[in-house]
Structures are given as C-alpha cells and as structure tokens.
Amino acid sequence: MSGSATGDDTNEKLHVYLIAGEPSGDVIGARLIEALRAGGGVRLSGVGGPEMARAGLESLFPYGELAIMGLTEVLPSVPRILGRMRSVARHIGEVRPDVIVTIDSPGFVFGVIRRLASRDCPRVHYVAPTIWAWRAGRVKKFRRHFDHLLALFPFEPPLFEAAGLACTFVGHPAAEGDVASGDGAGFRARHGIWADDTLLCLLPGSRRGEVSKLAPVAEEVVTTLLAEHPDLRIVIPAAPNVRADIDRFAARLGDAVLVVDGTTERYDAFAASDLALAASGTVTLELAYAGVPTVVMYRVGRLTGEIARRMIRVRYASIVNIVAEREVFPEFLQSRCEPGPISSAVLALLSQPEKAAEIGRAASGIARDVSGQDGKPSMRAAETIRSIVATWRSR
C-alpha cells in the first residue's frame, strides 16, 4: 500500500506516481489522470506539466527542465538532470506508490528507474518505444526495468510480447478531446479572420531546442509565402514552455501572425486552418485527425542527425507516412529542411486546394485507424493500470 498517508481514506485510493517530461506526455498524463479519477479514488504524485497540474498533479519540480532535445543540447544540462533523476527516485522511495507510470521521455525515465532502491510496485511505461523504427534492441532494456507497456498503435503489442514483455494497445491520445471537433468558424470570428481568408497553422516545435532550429527556417518560409500571398494569415498555437520564444519569433513577422495558447484555442485553430507547417511529432497525428493537410519539417544537430540516420529503420518521420508506407504529408528533414523546398511545397498546396483536401482526407482516415475507433485510449489505459495493480497485489 501507499506510504505517506494523509486523510482517513488515503489507503482506499490507488496511489499513482506519474512521470512526464515533455508537452505531449503532459497531455497524455492529464487525460490519464482524468480517466483514473473516473474509475475511482486516486492519489497522485510525480512530475508533470501544466496540463497534469490542471488535472490535479502537484509536480515535484517544473517539468520544463527536462524538455531538451539532441545529444549536443543535453550535455550542458547533464548535472542538473542527474540531480533531478536522484530526487525523483528518492521521492518514490518516500511515498511508496501502488504503481509507477512513466510517459515517454525514456532517457530521463530510465535514469530514475535505475536509481530505485526496490521493486515493490509494478512499473508501467505509457507510449511503447518505437522499436519498429529504430534500435530494436531497446526492448531488452524495457523488459528488464518495466512490467508492462501501454502501446499507442495496434501493431505494437505482438512485437513486444514476442520479446517477453507484456504490452496492451490502448490507442493514440489524438483520438481524444476536441482535436477533431474544434470550432473553426468561431475561431475566425474571434480573431478577425474572414471566412475566405487562407489560414496557415504553424507549429515550429514544443521544445526550445526544436524552436531554435526550426523557427529560422519557418521565418524564411513565412516571408516567402507572404510575398506571394500577402493576404495569408498565420496562427501559431504555442506550447507554454516555448511561448516567450514564439512571441519573439512572431514579432519579427508582423501583424499577419497570431499566437494563441491553451487546448481550446489550439484545436479551434486546427479546425480553422486550411493547411499546416509543423515540426515532426505528435502534433502531426493531431493535425491528421483534424483533417488538416500538413507539410512536415524537422532538424536536429548534425551529430544527432548522423547517428539517427544510421540507426533509423523506417523511411519517414511522420506516423501518418510510416503507417501509410508513402508520403501522405510532404516531409522535409535534416538537409532537406530548408526554406526553399518547404516554401515550394506549401505554395503548391495553396495553389491546389483540391490536392490539399485529398491529403487531409487521407491523413484523417489513417489517424483514425491508429488511434482506436472508440476514441477512449485514456480510459483503456486507466483500466489496464488498475488491472495490473490488482494482479500485482494478488501475487
């Protein structure tokens, strides 16, 4: 049972220790918290961001400290990150949860797990590692440190079960919330965007390292687009931890750019947009689910990119393209992530709305196939976690 009891009913509650280290994991964690609460009493500890805080988690420290990308970018922060790993491991030992649920962020997560003094509760990792894309040998490490994986895609459980690690498909969180039902007309009305104005949704990353590399590219792209289409409007749904960076970037581009924040504004912006230019990541699946034709861009440091190029086993970065085994969303990665080619791709979609609409429809169908048809991945995850704890207690 959980330690550090407070209140008469504490011992009746399931004590869940959650660890999320980036915005996408924060959203997954928040929805998981809501689903756990819907299934009965729950007590929360751990590390998360603003979405998990709104759902009721008091984070041990600001999770933005962990949102670092790339090998060279991580190195200066190593001492601080190691210290945070030790503090989380100590905290787990002090509060003694009923289950540890880690969400993505494998580098930080493994640092914590390795420092735990005992294995007196089940360990569940939410967002199975993409062994089908790169570094298949990672499954051994996960099997050694975790008891169960929660997978986002239906083709993943057989891969892990064949390697001796229990795994349950729960679906991708892009199926949840209002991602596919935003109020596009309301968004345009609120922000003075006419119904016949063309709106581009720009998402240059949710981590500072991403924004620092992609914003200069995006700035040149936007400048080119505005020269060709001076009436083009641009909206940037900013993640909280990069809002200041996005504001500085937007200020250089003038009145054509609107910056918004919050989940409602984000999904309404998707619904209002004619197309998107986005960093590779979870957001591309969200855009697919919303039916927004999207051009994908991504760039990491040269060393990180060279290492990844030698290890990656799939041709594409976007999950939409990986599942389709073709380039549904045009991708511009590493050396191809340059303003000229990206501008040409976006201009082509602007000039061919029928083709853009076809891309949006195809992507939406793929997103629904991989996200779970009932739209309740968090509820399935919560039910699986409760079942894992019940089985552990009955051993």
Image (spheres, rainbow, N blue to C red):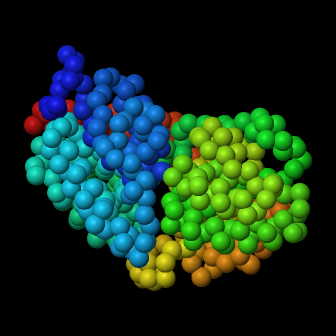
**Residue 335 pos. (x, y %):** 59, 82
Q: Quadrant of residue 85?
A: bottom left
Q: Quadrant of residue 84?
A: bottom left
**Residue 141 pos. (x, y %):** 23, 64
The residue that appears at 31% across and 68% down in the rendered structure is 78
Tell me: 393 left or right of 13: left
**Residue closest to the eye, 111 or 184:** 111
Q: Quadrant of residue 379?
A: top left
**Residue 120 pos. (x, y %):** 12, 43
Note whether 301 is above or below 100 in the view shown.
below
Note whether 334 is above or below 176 in the view shown.
below
Residue 137 seen anywhere in this rendered image of the structure:
yes
**Residue closest to the eye, 313 or 302:** 302
Note whether 66 is above or below 375 in the view shown.
below
Q: Residue furthest top?
A: 8
**Residue closest to the eye, 365 or 105:** 105
Tell me: 208 left or right of 186: left
**Residue 87 pos. (x, y %):** 22, 51
The residue that appears at 30% across and 27% down in the rendered structure is 42
Number of labelled discs? 0
The residue that appears at 51% across and 74% down in the rendered structure is 300
Note whether 93 is above or below 301 in the view shown.
above
Residue 180 seen anywhere in this rendered image of the structure:
no
Tell me: 208 left or right of 226: left
Question: From the image, which quarter does the N terminus lie in?
Answer: top left
Question: From the image, which quarter does the C terminus lie in?
Answer: top left
The residue that appears at 88% across and 44% down in the rendered structure is 194
